[in-house]
Image (tube, rainbow, N blue to C red):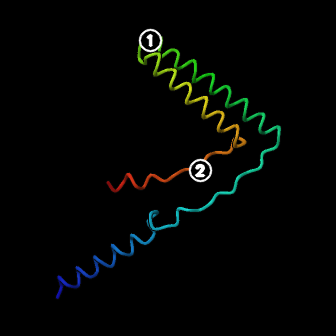
Amino acid sequence: MKKFLVICLTACSLFLVNLDHPAAQDTNVKRESVKFTEAQKTELANIQKRILADKKVLIEKYVEYGALTKEEGDKMLSHFEKHYKMMEEHNFQIPPHRPHSRHMHQ
């Protein structure tokens, strides 16, 4: 009888602990986008351009030191430029974050 009671209490406590698990919550919450003013867009664009320029310098150094090939460096730079254009097209809104929960259960 004691074993049965312990098993039931353990099962109930495990069930109650998992009720507030983040995976049990709704992850499809739509975040409202912020409307930036033209001054804010200009400031964000300048910061993004500086970041892009710094990334270009960094990749060029990796190519110079032999850590990356010229083709790999060019591919990375084109990816960074595409990302900047995408951010510009979307008015520098932060893209939505996709949860990585599917990786945790494999």
Q: Quadrant of residue 93?
A: top right
Please provide percent x and percent y for residue 64: 47, 11
Please provide percent x and percent y for residue 80: 57, 29
Q: In which quarter of the image is residue 20?
A: bottom left
Which residue corresponds to mark 1?
A: 65
Which residue corresponds to mark 2?
A: 96
CA distance for labels 2 and 1: 35 Å
Q: Nearer the viewer, residue 90 or 65?
A: 90
Which amino acid type is marked by label 1? Answer: Tyr
Mark 2 and mark 1 residues within 8 Å of each other at the beta carbon? no
Vertical position of residue 60 compared to residue 99: above or below: above
| Quadrant holding the C terminus | bottom left
Label 2 secondary element: loop
| Residue situated furthest right in the rendering | 38
- Please name the residue shown 53% across and 16% down the image: 60
Q: In which quarter of the image is residue 44?
A: top right
Q: Tag on residue 103?
A: none
Vertical position of residue 99 compared to residue 63: above or below: below
Vertical position of residue 1 compared to residue 103: above or below: below
Could you classify mark 2 by the number of other residues whose Cα lies within 10 Å: few (under 14), some (14-19), or many (20 or more)?
few
| Quadrant holding the N terminus | bottom left
- Please name the residue shown 64% across and 38% down the image: 86
Please provide percent x and percent y for residue 15: 35, 75
| Horizontal relation, residue 28 to residue 38: left or right | left
| Residue situated furthest bottom in the rendering | 1
Which amino acid type is marked by label 2? Answer: Pro
Q: Which of marks 2 and 1 is nearer the N terminus?
A: 1
| Residue situated furthest top in the rendering | 64
| Horizontal relation, residue 1 to residue 60: left or right | left
Label 1 secondary element: helix
| Horizontal relation, residue 82 to residue 59: left or right | right
